[in-house]
Every structure is written in structure tokens, then in C-alpha cells.
Image (spheres, rainbow, N blue to C red):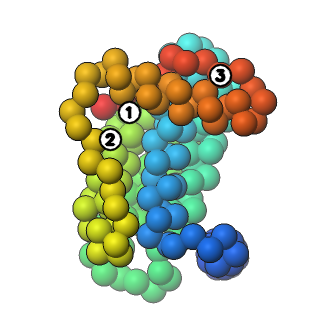
Amino acid sequence: MVSKQASDAYFQAQANAKIHPVKLVHMMYERLLLNLACACEGLEENDVKKRGENLSKAIAIITELNCSLRPGDESEPAQFLRGMYEAMLIELGKVAVSKDAAVIRQAHRYVSRLKKIWEETAMQENGFAVKKKTERPAEDAREEAAMAYQRCHEKEGVAASANLCFLV
């Protein structure tokens, strides 16, 4: 019953936001990657609050992605995604106790790959332009992500740390 309610709430929020569902999923993947990176950073810095908040947000996004799959869709891709999301939910839920950054890194790799597949298929099929990232040194990528993280936290009125943990 809770799944049905969550699914209904998801679709209602989606309709109210007037964001194309394909773009919304892409945005969720992007935010999920950022939350996983911040959770890893919090774990490595032994910052319980940072780890907990970002891990909770990542778990919430994965739950939303899982609920967004059509109920009753038994296709191979849907079954794969359900299994992937459920496995990530189980393993990420254990991180608070195990403090195993490898679990977060693995989830980050899975989500990165899912995001790339989503961009190559659904985004292009629905006419959304996806910026191709050129190969840049890790230093540039870190700076870009750190600035995005800082902008996000400035909007919330929180001083942000510019040192992110990169997992790929």
C-alpha cells in the first residue's frame, strides 16, 4: 500500500512540476551522484552529520527512482532496475554501521553508468540535448563539482566545503 501511495505522490508531484519525466529522472541521477560523493566525503572526514544527511538523501532518491518504475512492468529492463535499486538500498543502508566507503563508491559507479545509458537512450529519443563532457583532468572536474556543491549549499545558507570525494 505504501508503494502505491509513494508512486501516486511521485506522479502527482511530477505533473505539478511540469518537468518532462525523462528530464526529471536525469536530474535525479545527477543529484544522486552528488549526494553519494558528499556521503563518501563525510565518511572519510568522519563527519557523521554530513555522511548521514547525504546518505539519507541518496537513499530517498533511489527509493523515488524505484517507485517511478511502472507497476506491473515485468520487462527485463524494469526487473534489472528494480533489482539494482533494491540492492543499492540494502547496501547503502548498512554503511552507517559498517562505515565502508567501497559500498558508496560501487553505488556511485552503478549510478554513473545508469545515467550515461539514460542520456544515450531516453534523453536523445525525447529530444533532450545532452552536453558531451570532454576528457578533462581530474583537477578540473573536482573544481567544477566543488563549485556546484558550494552553490547548492549557499542557497541553503550553509557554508560549504569545496573538497569533494570523487569515486570514479
**Position of residue 108 measured from the top left corner of the image (x, y, whole percent):** 39, 40
Q: Nearer the viewer, mark 1 or mark 3?
A: 3
Cα separation, mark 2 vs mark 1, equals: 6 Å
**Callout 1 touching callout 3 (CB < 8 Å):** no
Disc marking residue 109: 2
Which quarter of the rendered picture does the C terminus lie within? top left
Q: Residues within 10 Å of mark 1 (few under 14, many from 20)?
A: some
Give the residue type at disc 2: Arg
What secondary structure is found at the residue carrying circle 2? helix
Q: Nearer the viewer, mark 2 or mark 3?
A: 3
Residue at 56% x, 13% y: name it. 45
Whether residue 97 is visible: no
Report the residue marked by disc 3: 160
**Position of residue 153 measured from the top left corner of the image (x, y, whole percent):** 68, 31
Give the residue type at disc 3: Ala
Cα separation, mark 2 vs mark 3, equals: 24 Å
Q: Residue lying at the far top in this picture: please name it.
A: 45
**Callout 2 touching callout 1 (CB < 8 Å):** yes
Report the residue marked by disc 1: 105
Closer to the camera in the image, 131 or 157: 131
Q: Along the horizontal axis of the image, is 163 left or right of 8?
A: left
